[in-house]
Amino acid sequence: MADVDVQSPQGGKGKKKAATKRTSTKIDMTPMVDLGFLLITFFMLTTTLAKPQTMEITMPDKNENKDDKMKVKESRTLTVLLGDNDKVYYYRGIPDPNDPQIGITNFGKDGIRKTLLEKKREIGKVRDDDSGKLVDGIIVIIKAKDTAKYKNMVDILDEMNITNIGTYAIVDMSEGDLSLMEVADNGGKPLTETAGQTAQG
Amino acid sequence: MAKLHFPRRNITLDMTAMCDVAFLLLTFFMLATKFKPDEPVVVDTPSSVSEIKLPESDIITLSISKEGAVFFGIDNTGTRLKLIEAMGDKYKVNFTDEEKAAFAYGSQIGVPMANLKQLLDASAYNQKQIKQPGVPVDSTHNELRDWIDLGRRLNVQVAGKVPRIAIKGDQGVDYAVVKRVIDTLQDLNINRFNMITSLESDPSKVAAAAAGKTE
């Protein structure tokens, strides 16, 4: 390459190459590659490329006028109560205090999802007043006990997504619902009877 | 038997191309990375099938730990700086410039205003050691309400955007705490918010995919 042609003063011996040794320019890249991949691994693990998933919730407006509130037929509603220990209670419409048809289920495979799908079919389709289209008639009212876990709430909202139920609301739990849950735990005996029993005992 | 004779080959190969790729990827990850903000509390989020992603910026994160402590965080540094001043005015706490900076560049907080000064005075390492009891959310003494209210308004001033509210609750926390937080939000007329969850496969889609395969 950059050989300097040194002409000997004598000129007798002709061309003589410079003493510089030709070294190979090839370097072993392996450690550099190692380092590169090490750093890649580090950045890949620390990076937050995967943004967290979210669920969007729209709560009913608290300050809304009472008259504006949607009035629904009780036959269309399914109330789902979230209790302790991942238990789910459900009933349709307004329960009769003497004979509450309240069911208990859980979040298992044949649990609330099956129930929701069944009830959805049972209630069937309803003609929407505004658009005149047939829509799912079911309206789910979700009430969670204070001691229910947050996971249960997310799970039930998730079930709404899975079963394609678009109309649902999260409502505060009332006294009546709390006692209904107790009734259901007692094997569905009417309220008055259990109250009598506790008074005696 | 004839002996097989393999010619000896040189096994060194040119690593340059591989090196190029490695560093190209490295550069990409270095530029694309955004370090996870360290959070004062570990929150184990419940899983859901929802695939909606959280927006990149302008989020108020309300973390709820397993013990029921509520933590407040907002991502915009400019907003945080103004927020700490506004909160100091409101609760008659004088923060020094260092404390304000510590808040602005810090992570989520989960202490009552009375103890915030103490927390911000601590070094970054000590801050992690302090067990934070959570921002008060009781109906009589609701500091979270002020944090959210001022945070929202100041973020509009600073970034020109109303921040989204994301609730990051632990799956084991009692619903009562979550309800208090949601009630606080509704008090402020915030009826739309997000709940941060981790991904779970949608059983109906999985079933559909499986059915599609068998057909």
Image: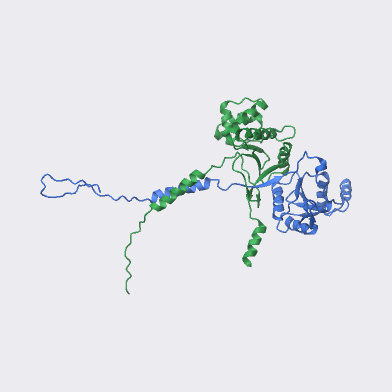
Chain colours: A blue, B green
Q: Is residue B4 above or below residue B37?
A: below
Q: How far from the left and from the top, in percent, is residue B192?
A: 70, 42
User: Residue A48, position in %: x, y?
Assistant: 55, 45
Judge left or right: residue A14 versus residue B65: left
Q: Is residue B167 above or below residue A185?
A: above
User: Which image quadrant for residue A106?
Assistant: bottom right
Residue shown at 75%/43% (left/top)?
A60
Determine if residue A14 is in view.
yes
Residue in front for this viewpoint, A184 or A59: A59
Q: Position of residue B40 (x, y in %)?
A: 60, 38
Seen as rendered, the residue at the extreme bottom is B1
Which residue: 83% across, 42% down?
A67
Measuring 66% from the left and 57% from the top, which residue is drawn there? Answer: B203
Q: Nearer the viewer, residue A28 or B19?
A: B19
Q: Is residue B9 left or right of residue A132?
A: left
Q: Is residue B121 visible?
A: no
Q: Which of the pair B124/B87 is nearer the observer?
A: B87
Q: How many discs appear?
A: 0
Q: Position of residue A51 (x, y in %)?
A: 59, 46
